[in-house]
Image (cartoon, rainbow, N blue to C red):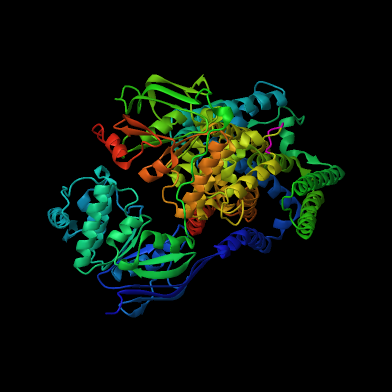
Amino acid sequence: MNSARLLRHLSMPLALAGICMFFALRESAFLGPRNLTQWLVEFSITGTLALGMFMILLTGQIDLSVGSGVGLIGGIAAVLVFHHAWPAAGALGAAFLVAVLLWTLMGTLIVRQRIPSFIITLGGLLVFKGLFWLVIQNSTVPVLRGEQDNLYSLLTTYYLPRDAGRALAGVVLAGLGLALWRSRSARRAHGLPVRSPRFVALAGVATAIGVVGLVEVCNRFRGVPLPLLILAATAGCVYFLTRHTPFGRYLYAIGGNEEAAVLSGIAVPRVLVGAYVLMGVTVALTGFMTTAYSGASTTTVGDLMELDAIAACVIGGTALRGGRGTVGGVIFGALIMTALLNGMTLLAVSPEIKFIARGLVLALAVWMDVRLGADAPRD
Amino acid sequence: MPPVFEARCLTKRFPGVVALREVNFALAPAEVHALCGENGAGKSTLIKLLGGIHPHGTYEGELHVDGRPTEFRSIRDAEAAGIAVITQEFALIEELSVAENIFLGRPPRRGLRVDWLELHRRAAVLLADFGLDLSPETPVRDLGIGQKQLIEIVRAMDKRSRILVLDEPTAALTEQEVAVLLDHLRRLRAQGTACIYISHKLDEVLAIADRITVLRDGASIMTLHRTEATIPRLIRHMVGREITEQFPPPTPPRPEDTGREPVLVVRDLSVAPFRHAPPRLQGISFELRRGEVLGIGGLMGAGRTELLLHLFGAWGCRIQGEVRLLGQPHAPTGPRDSIARGLVLTTEDRRRYGLVLDQGVGFNLSLSHLRNFRRPGGWIDQVAEQRGNQRLFESLRIKAPGLFARTGGLSGGNQQKVVLGKALMTEPAVVLLDEPTRGIDIGAKQEVYALIRRLTAEGRAVIVVSSELPELMGLSDRILMLAGGRLGGEFRRGEFSQESLLAAAMARPAPRAA
C-alpha cells in the first residue's frame, strides 16, 4: 500500500529525530561535538558489522556468531601485538585471515552439509566465545605495547586533519558527480529514461549539504574519525556489490525464491559461501575497531553485537525472510540503534534498563518487519 | 425468488489498476453459475470481495445476501453468511487426518478434550454421504489432488455453507476425478446449494453451469443461459474478438538446418530419483532436430516432468544411457551448466520455481543471463542490461507498467511471458517447456504458440510437455507418449489422433505414485 510505504520511508528519519530530541533535552551534551564524534565512532563500528549481516539476511540466512567473532578476532590481534610483540599490521593481517577462514568454514558447512544457519552460527557463538576467552586467558590485553601508538590503537584515535577532511569531501562529491554524469549520458545515448534535472539538482544539493555538514560537525571536535571512513568505504563496497554486480542480484534472488534461483542457473552454494566470507571480513574490521575503541581486549568485547547488527538491518527495512533491503536503510538502522545506546550511556542509564531497552527495540523492529511484510501484496 | 447473493455496481481499484469496474452479478438459489474470463479479467478479485478477503470499505458498490445489503469485514463474516471459497491452494493440513481436517478448528468435544470417537463417526458419515471410499483416519498427505478438493467441499458442506465458490477446481484433476466432482456439484445443487464455478475449461462449464457470466477487463460483459451458450460464443465474449485459428501452422525447416545432426540425442536413458532407487524413467530414446517441436504427453506420473528436469540437470541419478547435446556428451552438473551449454527449461509451476515474485520484471528477465552483461571489474553494464530487457519486454508484449513493476502483481499469462523471456535471453539452442500454457488465458496461449513457432523459425529446437492433447497435436511435429516411465509410442504429424495418443499413454500400467 502506498501510505504504508510512505510511512515506512518517513518513519526512520522521524524516529531518529525523535530519539535525538529526547536525549538532547535530557542532556545537552548529547549533541555536543565530543559526544557527536563518539556517537559517530560507535555508529561506524555497529554499522560496519550490520552491512555484513545485511548481505546474509538478504539471502534469508542469519548469523548469530558475529558478536563472539568480533571479540575473538580483536582478541587474537591484541594478543599477537601485546604478548608476542608482532607489528600491528602483521597482527591485524593474521587475525583477518583467521576471520576469513572461520567464516568460509561456517558457510561451507551450512551450504554443503545443509545444516540450518541458525544452528551452525549458534554453535559458532559458543565456540568463538570459548576460543576468545582461551586466547586472551580471561585477562585484559591492551592493543598496544608500550606508550607508542600503533596502527591498531590508531584505528579509533586517529582523526583526519580538518583540511584533509574537507578535501576528501570534495573528492567524494566530485566522484559521485562524475559517476552520475556518466551514467546519465550513457542512458540518454541509448534512449533510456533519466531522472528529471530538477530531481538530480535537489538530490545533489542535499548530498553536498550532508557530506560537507558531516565533515564540519566532526571538525568542531578533532576532525573526521577513521572508523567513519572505514564504514563509508565498506558501505560503498556493499552498495556496489549489491546494486551493480551479478553477485548482489543473486543475493536478492536467493532470498526471494531460492528454488527459482537454482533453476535460473545461479550457483547458489557459491554465492552463499561468498556472503559468509564477506561477513567474516566485516567481523574482522568490526573486531579491530571495537577492541581498539575500548583500548584493550576484555572478555566482554563484542557481547550481543550480533543482535545490534540484526536490529539495525531490520529497523532499516531488511526482511528477515530475505530478498528485501537496502544499504541506505541499514545505515539508518545503525544510526537509530547506536543513538539509543549512546544516549542511554550518556544519561548513565543502568545496565539492567539498557538490556531491556535493547530487547524491546529488537522485538519492535521485527514486529514492524512482520507487519509491513504482511501489508505488501503477496500473491 | 430473490438471488441468494448479489453484487451491485462493484468497483475495486488497486494502485494503478482498476480490477473491477461496475460489475453486476446475481446468484440464484440452487444454481451453478459459472464465471468465465481471461486471466486478469477480474474473476479472482470478485470472489475475494465476496469471500471477505478484501473487506468492506476497500471497494465501491454493494453486496447483498438474501436481498439484504451486507458488509463483510473479514473472512469470518463471509463464512458466517454461509459462503465457502475453495481456491487452488488448499487450506488442508497435510499431516493431519481427513477427519481432523474436516472438523479443523471446531472438533466435537466432550468436556475439555476432543471427542475422537464422535469425530471419526461423523467424518465417516459425511464421507459416505459423498460416496468417498476413504477411511477418516487417512492422513491428507496420502490423498490425490482430486480427493483433497472433495475433502475441502465436504468441510464446506459441514459448515452449512449455502454458497460454494470454486476457483479452478479441476485444474489438476484427471477426467474421472472431474466427472466425480461434477456429479457431487449436481447433487448439492439438487439439495439447494448455490455454486459459483470458475474454470478455464469451457466444455466443463457448459456441462455443469445453469448460467454463465463473462468478465472481460474487469467489467461484466454479459450473462448467458446455458441453452444460449456455445464455446465459440463464450470465447468471442471473453476475448472480444474472433479467434479464427487456434494453432499457427508449423514453420517449414530452414534450408540450412535440413540434413544436419540432431541437436539432442537421447539413447536408452534410465534415471532413478536417487542412487540405489528403482528407476523412474527406463529405456528412453529419441532425437530432436533444429527447427522441430517435439511434444511429450502422458498421464500424471508418467515421468514427463522428470525427463525434462533430468535433461536440465535438476533431477535424478542416471543409471544408464547417453545424452548428447550439440554433438557433445551431456551430463550437466546442474541447471547452470545446462544453460551455459545452450539448453534451458521453464517449469510448470512458474510462481514457485520460475520467478522471484517480489522483484521487478527486468530483474527476472535478465537473471539467467547476468554474467553476459558483466564488464571488466565485475560490474553489470546496466544500460546494456536494460536495453536487453526492454527488447524482450516489447517483443513478448508483456503487459505491465514497466520493467520495474513487481512480477507478483502480473496476471498468469504475463508472468509466463517473463519466465519465457528469462529463458530466451540466454540464446538457447534447445528449449524445454513444461506445461507452458497451464492456467493462462486464451489470448496469452495464442502468444505462447506464436512464440514457439518463432523459436523454431530461428532454428532452435523445442520440447513441449502438455497435458492437453489438442495442444500437443496442434503444436508438435512429432509426439512422444510416455507411460509409466517408458516410451509408449512415437507419432509423426499426420498420424495424430486423440484415440491413438491416449492408447499409447495407457500402454503400460502407471507406476504407483511416490
- The quarter of the displayed image where residue B95 is located: top left
Left or right: B324 in relation to A190 = left
State yes or no: residue B197 in magenta: no
Q: Give the answer, above or below, for where A78 lies relative to A320.
A: above
- State whether residue A58 appears in this view: no
Region in magenta: B376-380
- The quarter of the displayed image where residue B226 is located: bottom left
In percent of width and height, residue A127 lies at 48, 30
Q: Give the answer, above or below, for where A182 lies relative to A377.
A: above
In percent of width and height, residue B274 lies at 35, 26
Give the number of marks.
0
Left or right: B465 in relation to A211 = left
Q: Residue at x 45, y 54 (%)?
A: B442
Q: Give the answer, above or below, for where B445 lies relative to B476.
A: below
Out of B499 and B427, give the one closest to the viewer: B499
Q: Which of the image's four quarters has the N terminus of chain A?
A: bottom right
In percent of width and height, residue A210 lies at 76, 54
Out of B308 and B212, give the one closest to the viewer: B212
Q: Main secondary structure of the magenta part?
A: loop
- State whether residue B31 appears in this view: yes
Out of A160 and B169, give the one closest to the viewer: B169
In percent of width and height, residue A52 lies at 60, 39
- The quarter of the displayed image where residue B367 is located: top right
Check the image and name the residue furthest to the front: B494
